[in-house]
Image (cartoon, rainbow, N blue to C red):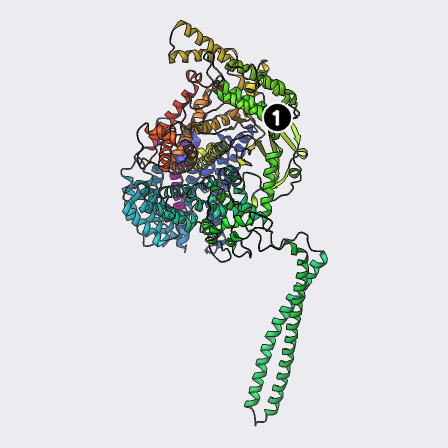
Amino acid sequence: LELSRTTMNNIDLLHDSILRVPDWAALKDCVTKFPLDDGIKVRQSQACLQVMENRLENVDTVVAQGIQKTLEKWILLPADSSMNCLTPLQEKLQQFVEIQESGRLLVQVNSTLNPSGQLDQGHIDNVRQTLAMWRERLPCPWDSPLTWNDIITWRNHVYTSIGNSFQALRDGGHEIPHGLVSLGVNELAWTINLFGKTCRKHNLPDVAISCLKKMFSFGSMDVSDYFNQTKEEVKCYLQRPENFENPLMTGLNRINSCNMDDFSVQQKAVLFSLKANIFREMGQAEEANQAFSSSLSMCSDMSSSWLAWALHCDKVCAENKNNSVWGEGAVVSLFQAVRFGSKKARVYLSRALRLLSLACGQSDSAPERSGVVKAFNDFVDVLPSWVWLPWIQQLIPMLTRSEAPQARAILVLIAISYPQAVFFPVRSFLEERKPLDNPKRHWTQDALSVAKPMTQALLPSAAVQVSAQAHLQQVNAANAQVTVLKQKCTQLAAASLKAQQLAKNQAGTAQAAVAVKSAQQAQVISNLAQKEYGDALQKVSVLIQRQQLIAQQEKAGQLQQEPDPKAPQPPGEGASGSQPGQGQQASQPQNNPMGAKRQQQSSDSSVGNQVLLVDGGKSLANSAAKLVASTPYENGDIIMAWLIKAHHVLYTDLEKIAHEIAFRMKPQPEEQLLGLMNALLHRCYQVPPEGAVEVVSSLRTALEEVSKMCFGTGVNHGPNRTHIAPTIVDLKPAFEAELAPQTAKNFPLDVELFITRLRRWKIIFQRRVDLIPDHQNLEQLSRFLTDLRSSKVEVFAPDLNKFEEPNVDFHPTIERISVDVKVLRRHSGASRRLHLIGSDGASYYFVLETSVNFLCQRTEERSSQLCRMINYFLEKDNNCRRKRLRIDTPSFIPTGQHTRLVSDNPSTTALSDALESFTELEGGAIDNPLRCFRKVYSETLGKLKKSSKSINNSQIVAAKLEAFNHVCSNLIPDSCLSDWVSASIPNVNHLFLFRKRLAQTLGTSSLFVYAFAINARKPQNILVSRDSGSVSQLYLRPVISSKGVIECDEPVPFRLTRNLRHVITDCGVHGILSDAMSSFIAALNNNSTLLKYIFESIIRDELTVWTTARIDALTKATYGNDQPPLHLSFNVLLEERVTESLASIFQRLGLPLEYDSDASKSEQAVAAVEKVRTLVESASKESLLCLMDQSWHAWF
C-alpha cells in the first residue's frame, strides 16, 4: 500500500491494496480523488463500498452496471477466443455475483430480530444456506492463487461483518446463541485453511504458513478447523520452505505442542502419520516406523498412512539393496492403501510390480518363498481388478518370466470383469508366442468346444410363455392363501383349547352347560379350518407339479445343447460346472486319435491343480495362479480361456472383428510396392554420398524378398507357386529385368545409380496407386463388418489410464461401421481408415496399419503408455493444467502379429504434406532438395579431396553446411510451411490460436522425444491438426545404444527447423514454446520419485527384449576381454542397464535421479529455464542441422 502511494504512483495497485487491507474510508476517498479508467473496477469498488457502508438498497444497481460493463467487454472479443481471454471476465462476473449475494446476506443478518425482539429462524436459515453455497462454489484447484485471493479476501470481509453484527446484538442485551456469534469466525477459519491448502498445492508453502498463522488471533475456533490448521501447517513444513530454518524440526515441534485431547481418534492418527513423515524425512527410520505403527493402530483404514508407510518401507528397502523383508512391507502397505481407496496409491502399483520382478529375479530357485510373492498371492483377490487396468502393458510381458503365476492371476480377474481391455493384447501375445513355444495343449480350443449349458436357440412360443406366467401367478397366490390359513388354524386351535379349559374349570356350576357348548362350537370351527388348510396344501402341490411339467416341455427342444460330461472343459470348469479345475482331466472325443496322448500329457498338471473351486468358496485369482503352465503361450492361453468361459458370445464377436479387419482390408499389391520403394529410397539416402558407394547386401536382400513376395521370382514352379495380382502382372518382366537381384543382368552396383532406378519404379507404382479410388465400399470388403449393428463390442481403445474405476455402462459401443472406407496415402504409403459410429453418437476413426513388426508394435505401445502417464501428471500440475499442456498420442490396438489399428483424427496431416505440396507447385518432387544436397556435398567433398590429401572433420562439416545453405537459399524457403498453414486458416485470430497451440504441443512432445532418445523426427512422422494446431508424434521408438542404454547421438535434440520457427515466430519460440518446456520439466520434477518408479517398470520391459537378443555382445561391450564377475546373470545385467538408462533420461531432463532435500525450488526453476534455452539453441543451430540424415529434411 505504501509502495503504491509513494513510489510507483500506480492507481490500480492502490485500489487493490486498500480493498485488501481493508480501509473503507480510504477506498471511498481514493475512488473520488483517483478515478480508474477501467469501468469494471470502478463499479466493483463502488459496490464493495455500498455493502460495507450498509447502504444495501443500492448494491443491486451498482452490481448490474458492473455486469453490464463486463458483458460489453466480452462482446468485443472475437467469436473464437480462447479460454485464456474469457477467464478474467468470468472471474469478474463471479466477483460481482458474490458482492450482490453479500448485500442480500447482510440484509438477512440485519433482519435477524423480528419486531417482537425474537430471533427469526427463517432469516438465520437463509444466512446458513448462503454460506454453505459459498463453500461449494469455489475456483478450480488449478486456478492462480491470485484468483483465489480475490474471492477469499472479499468473503473474509463479509464473514467479519457477520460476526460483528451478531456480537453487537449480543452486546445489546439480546439472547444470541454462541453458534451464531462464532458463525463468522468459523467460516473465516475454514476459508483460511482452504486458502492455505491451495497455496501449498501451488508450491507456495511460505505463503500458506503466513496465512495459517493469522488464525492464532481468533478467540474461538472449532476443533475441526484447529485440526485442519495444524495439519496444513505441518504439511507446509514438510515441503521445506526456504524462508524457515530447520522447517522439519519446526513442524515436529508444532505437532508436539498441539493439544490432542479434543481430537478424534482419526485426527490423532493423521497427526501421528505426519510425525512419521517428518521422522522419515529426517532420516530417523526407527522412529518413523513406530509413529506409523501408532497411527494405524488408532485407525487401521486410513489409506494415507498406509501409503506413507509403504513409501517409508520402500525407501529402507532400496537403501538395504532390495531387502526382501522391507520389500514385503512396502507391497503389503501399498496394497492396504489401495484397498482403502487411495487414488495416489494406485499410481504406485508400478512399484509393486517392479518389486515383484526383483523378488522373482533374485530367487529363481523358489520364488514362491519370497515375501513379495506371498503378498501378491494374499491381496490379489482383495483388490478390485480395475486398479490393474493401467498396467496391462506390464502384466503381459510378465507371462514370460518367473512372476507369471501372479501376473496371470491378475489378468484372469481383468478378463472376467473387463474382457475387452485384455482381449486384443492377449490375442496378439498368443500370436507372437505360438511359433516360439510350439504349445501341445490349447486351452482356448478346449473352452470353445464346451457347449454352453441351457442356452436356448429359439424363444419359446407366446402360448408357452403365457401358460408359464399364469401358473407361476397361481402358485404364488396359492402359497399366500396357505400362509393365511395356517395362521388362522393356529389362532382357532388356541381358541378351542382355551374354551375346553374354561369348560373344565366350570364343571359343576350353573355356567357349565354354556361353557361345554361353546367349546364344542370352537372345536368344529377349528376342524373346518384344518380341512380348508389341507385342501390349500393339496392345491399348491398340484400347481407345482403342473409347473414342472411345463418346464420340462420348454426344455424338450434343448436336449441337444446339454453339456457332454466327457467333453473337454476350459481351465476352471469341470463337467458339473461347480468345480472348474477338474475340467483339465476331461477326456478327448473318441474320434480323435491324439486324445489319449493329449490327456496323458495334461494329466500330471491337472491332478495337482484342481483348485479353481468357484462354487466351493476358494479364491479365483489364487486358483488361477496355481495352474501349472509350461510355456508363456499357455499362460496367455489360460487367460483367454477364462475370458471365453465368462464371455463366450463377446469373444466370438471380437475374434471375428479382428480377423475381418486384419485380412479384408490389406492394401493392394501396388500400394505395398510403393511403400517398399519409399522405404528402400530412405535407406539409400542414409548412405553418405562420399564418392562411389556400393549397394549394401541388406538392400539386395530386401529386394529379393520383395520380388519373391510380389512377383514370385524364383518360386513360380511347383507347390510354392506364388499368385501374382492381376494389376501388376504386366510389370513382372520389367521388374525382374531391372530390380530383382536374382534375375537382373545389369543390377546397379553404385548407390546413386540404384537410387535413380528406385525413383523410376517409384513413379511407376505411384501412377498405379493414383488409379485406385480414394474411397472403398465396406460391403465389398467385409459383409460381417457391414452387418455389425448395435453390438455389445465397445469402441476400441477406451481410456483406462485415469486410475479410477471405469463405468462400463458409459463406454460407447459400436453402433455401426460406416460403409465408406477412406484410403489414406500418408508417408507415400497407403492404408485404410475405418469410421465407427458409437452408441453415444460420436464418430471414431481408426487407421489399419500392416506390415508392422510385433517388436515395434510393443515398443510404440509402451511409448504411448508413457505419454498417457505423463499426461496424468500434467493434469495434476496446476501450472500445466492452466496452460492445457499434454502430449497428444494415438491409441494402438493390436489386431494381429503384424497388423494394428491406430486411432486417427481426420483433421491431422503430416508436415511432409506441406513440403510435398510446395515441391509440386515448383514442378519437382519431394526428394529433389535431398538429391540436390547430396550432389552439392559430393562436389564440394571432391574438390577438397583434390586440394588436400586428407580431410578432417571440420572440413566435412563445412561441406555439409555449404550444401545445406545451398538448398535453403535456392530450393526451400523458410516460409513454405507458413504459406501452407495460412492457406487453410480462416482468419487472423484463428491463426494466432493455431500458432500458440502448435508451440505448446510441439514443446511438450519434443521434450518427450528428446528425453527418451526417440529419433527419426522426420516430417512424415510429425502430425499437425489443421483445426487446432496440436502436434502428435508417430513412430515413438527409443534408441538403445550398443551398451544397452537408452540414449541417442543425433546432433540436434529435437526438430525445430527454419520453417517451424517461421510459423511459430521468434516470440513464440522464446516465449510460448520455451515456457511450455519449462512447465513440463517443473511438473515432472514435482513428481520425480513416482515417475522414476513408472519409468523403471516400462523401461525394463523395453530393455528385456533387447538384452535377451544381445546378452553375449553386451557382456563383451561392458567388460571387454576381462572375465565378467561370477555373480553376473541376466537379471543383474538387465538391472544395470535399467539404472543407467534411467539416469540418462533424468540427466537429459535436468532432473536429479535421487530426491535432493536441500535443493532450492527457485534454483531448480532457473536450471530448468537454462536447460530449455540450451536445447532450443542447439535445435536451431544450422551447423548442427546440416549434420542430420538427409532424409530428415533439415532444411524444411
Q: Residue furthest top?
A: 947
Is residue 1116 found left or right of 671 in the rendered image? left
Q: Nearer the viewer, residue 790 or 269?
A: 790
Q: Quadrant of the N terminus?
A: top left
Q: Residue at x 64, y 66 (%)?
A: 476
Give x and y (percent) for residue 918.
56, 17
Q: Is residue 1062 above or below residue 369?
A: above
Residue extending furthest right?
463
Query: Magenta includes 195?
Result: yes
What secondary structure is the stretch in magenta mostly built from? helix
Taking the image as shown, residue 192 lies to the left or right of residue 713, namely left
In the image, taking residue 386 as reference, residue 465 lies left or right, namely right
Q: Nearer the viewer, residue 230 or 240?
A: 240
Q: Is residue 665 above or below residue 946?
A: below
Q: Amino acid at mark 1?
A: Asn
The x and y percentages for residue 738 are 58, 16
**Residue 37 visible within the image:** no
Total of numbered circles in the picture? 1
Q: Do we see residue 669 in this rendering?
A: yes
Give the crowd class for mark 1: few <14, some 14-19, many >=20 residues within 10 Å.
some
Q: What residue sits right under mark 1 in the picture? A: 716
Magenta highlight range: 186-204
In magenta segment, residue 650: no
Q: Position of residue 647 (x, y in %)?
A: 57, 48
